[in-house]
Image (cartoon, coloured by chain):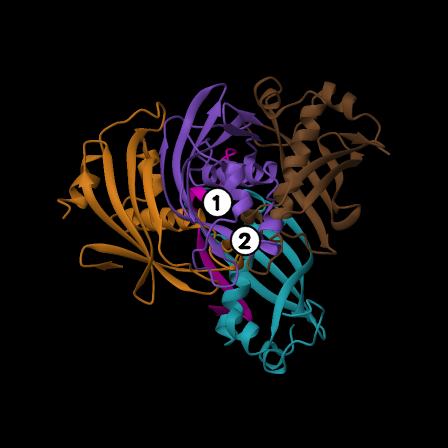
Chain colours: A orange, B brown, C cyan, D purple
Amino acid sequence: MMLNNTFLLPVRVYYQDTDAGGVVYHSTHLNFMERARYEWLREMGFDVNSLIKIHKTLFMVRSLEIEYFKPAVLDDLLHISVHVTELGRSRITLTQEILCSHIRLVCAKIHVVCVGTDTLKPMSIPVPLREKIGKPA
Amino acid sequence: MMLNNTFLLPVRVYYQDTDAGGVVYHSTHLNFMERARYEWLREMGFDVNSLIKIHKTLFMVRSLEIEYFKPAVLDDLLHISVHVTELGRSRITLTQEILCSHIRLVCAKIHVVCVGTDTLKPMSIPVPLREKIGKPA
Amino acid sequence: MMLNNTFLLPVRVYYQDTDAGGVVYHSTHLNFMERARYEWLREMGFDVNSLIKIHKTLFMVRSLEIEYFKPAVLDDLLHISVHVTELGRSRITLTQEILCSHIRLVCAKIHVVCVGTDTLKPMSIPVPLREKIGKPA
Amino acid sequence: MMLNNTFLLPVRVYYQDTDAGGVVYHSTHLNFMERARYEWLREMGFDVNSLIKIHKTLFMVRSLEIEYFKPAVLDDLLHISVHVTELGRSRITLTQEILCSHIRLVCAKIHVVCVGTDTLKPMSIPVPLREKIGKPA
């Protein structure tokens, strides 16, 4: 779902996502964010298989910053956002948030790099994908 | 560590292994069991890389039965056992238990199959590994 | 979604679900099955929070058998089924399958037990839930 | 193990830690880092149970930055470091690295906060732990 140029994926919290502190385990939020990035790519027509088989590329996380404001808990219906803030030759910078009932629980800035499937070296983002992403805000 | 023909791997329980019920999440016990199987193989001289690169084989879980008697909790020091009960041409049947202070928390019977890395089809267990495993009880 | 008395949950396979063998990691299928069980309970009006807060109960996996027929791979759209086969006083036996394009990849028989949130001892399945589940095939 | 005021935990990479890209999944490195932090606390005499039961505190990750330089792969023997860089009233800033054969694969700066187990509000780090951590570099 796109909202003001931001993609949103709903994700339900199950026992598998939580820890004995009663909250979503901190690294699990990064798993939720990966799901949202791939659904965002799919919505633009670039599912992971076409990226690998047709374009011979995949995206790797190069670095990220993440801040936890409030915990998410069992059975929460979260919304995971994807918003592109910078688009380089081979690098995309995204802001991703985790929301629950419009409250921001987590915020991350994530740098992913497009690499060749054989070499794992950086290569240009495929042109049709670049055009779809367009000029980010 | 081998004890009466049974290999034992110590594993500590961290937050990442638990869920909001305050106990180790049920599928996580299978992760602990995988760790023990690979350390048992390593102790016999068959680390996963030599299996893949020299013997062109890997092991896949074909089926398993698991029973949960008592929960494991945060900070428990568990011991995961590996005991071979049947040794076929390409199949190994193992009994694995999860113990805490000599109390049995979980018990599983696991069937793994030796497959070729290229074909993923069953192939004979490499002879030197078969000889190491020897005649199970 | 209910189909012939069987609940089906669609689940997409992401990198986080796979392993270096290129397939969905064996214990991850149990995570998919947990998601389907909780969505099935929710569809009957028994989300996990109402079970805990109103009925003071939760479900724990007591034992299971699982068989892996074919691997699931990155980007597969799986369907996870839930089908009740036995309904005891405190125990439910379910058959769960993982399907991809109508092909059965994984099949499991799972025993869950209704326990009190305070005691973790078995207690009767709440009557309104029992009536919803009804007489299984 | 302490080395030049830095704690190091060895961690082996299993299938469960990898993804279909053949490398350790990016969020799994944070799981490795959690294990190292808790073993570091244990080495100082503050296992998680004594923190919870005696000191009524637990540590939550408040924010972090992580950079991935090189991938870790199946069967790698990693060393996860813990090094305190700042010690506040309720906050600890740590640098953690993931090394393989002395090569740095991953580096993170992690802020954890000491909170009360009941309130989840920030509270002072227990004095005996603070004294053990001492004056960081």
Which residue is disc 2 drawn over? C31
Q: Position of residue D120 (x, y in %)?
A: 46, 60
Residue contact between numbered discs 2 and 1, judged by CB atoms under 8 Å? yes
Q: Position of residue A16 (x, y in %)?
A: 53, 55
A108 to C118, vertically: above or below: above
Viewer-proximal residue, B56 or D58? D58
Chain at tag 2: C
Numbered tag placed on residue D9 in the rendering: none
Which tag, 2 or 1, sits closer to the chain's start?
Answer: 1
Which residue is disc 1 drawn over? C17
Q: Residue at x 71, y 24 (%)?
A: B43
Q: Is C93 left or right of B86, judged from the image as shown?
A: left
B40 to C26, vertically: above or below: above
* Magenta residues, start to end: C1-24
The quadrant in which residue B94 appears is top right
Q: Are marks 2 and 1 on the same chain?
A: yes
- Residue C5 belongs to magenta span: yes
Q: Position of residue B115 (x, y in %)?
A: 62, 30
A84 to D68, vertically: above or below: below
Q: Position of residue D81 (x, y in %)?
A: 49, 30
Report how many numbered discs are placed on residues in the image. Answer: 2
What's the amino acid at mark 2?
A: Asn
Task: Give me the C-alpha separation between circle 2 and circle 1.
Answer: 9 Å
Q: Is C122 left or right of D121, judged from the image as shown?
A: right
A76 to D17, vertically: above or below: below
Assess disc 2: are there few (<14), some (14-19) or many (≥20) residues with their C-alpha within 10 Å of its C-alpha.
Answer: some
Chain at tag 1: C
Label 2 sits on a secondary structure element that is: helix
Label 1 sits on a secondary structure element that is: helix
